[in-house]
Amino acid sequence: MSTRRSFLKKSLFGGLALAVGGGGLALWPTRRDHAPRRPLKVFNEKEFAVFAAVAARVVTVAGADPVTIVHNIDDLFVTAVPEAKRDLKRLLGLFDNALAGLLFDGRPKPFTRLNAERQDEALRAWRDSKMIVRRAGYTTLRKLSLAAHYGQPSTWASAGYPGPPNIALPT
């Protein structure tokens, strides 16, 4: 009987410690190294900062500007269905959540508070995760970042793309 009580007390204490500590980790603020240059349409400033930090690690070619990349995505998502907006915003929140980082990757800091090397490790952990949700989240952030960068006509020449062909339309 006392063994069961001891187990329950330890379990309750451990659960309480995890809840209190985890709550603190979940509230660790996002570092905002990248600020928007104009009013945002879909993202808030925190989400913008997280996405820009991801874009800075994903699009590493010379001249890539994470702020411009995320502004392009913000413009694109104005026309998205509400569910897509909500899901992307939740993904960004989860990506920068220190508690999720601790539980899944052993890193007790938000993504935006990591140095460049640790951010690359976090991205690889999402990319190579056994959890399909994390792999899909990584793929979404990566593909949106790359598309928003290379979708700009100013980047086409650096990628060796001459631009769309000039096709005469029938009159």
Image: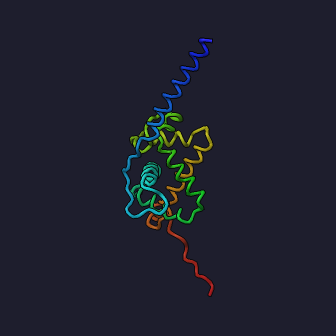
- Residue at 51%, 35% in the rendered image: 105
Q: Which of 49 and 99 lies nearest the eye of the viewer? A: 99
Whole-percent x, y for residue 17 in the image: 48, 28
- Residue at 53%, 64% in the rendered image: 78
Give the vertical position of 49 relative to 122 (above or below).
below
Q: Which of 19 and 54 lies nearest the eye of the viewer? A: 19
- Residue at 42%, 61% in the rendered image: 68
The quarter of the image holding the N terminus is top right
Whole-percent x, y for residue 103 in the image: 52, 34
Whole-percent x, y for residue 148 in the image: 49, 60
Query: Residue pushed farthest top?
Result: 2
Figure quadrant of residue 24: top left
The reply to whether residue 164 is in sight is: yes
Q: Which of 142 and 32 lies nearest the eye of the viewer? A: 32
The reply to whether residue 55 is in sight is: no
Whole-percent x, y for residue 155 in the image: 45, 63
The quarter of the image holding the C terminus is bottom right
Give the vertical position of 51 relative to 1 (above or below).
below
Give the vertical position of 134 relative to 39 (above or below).
above
- Residue at 47%, 57% in the rendered image: 43
Q: In this figure, which colouring scheme has been used for the structure?
A: rainbow
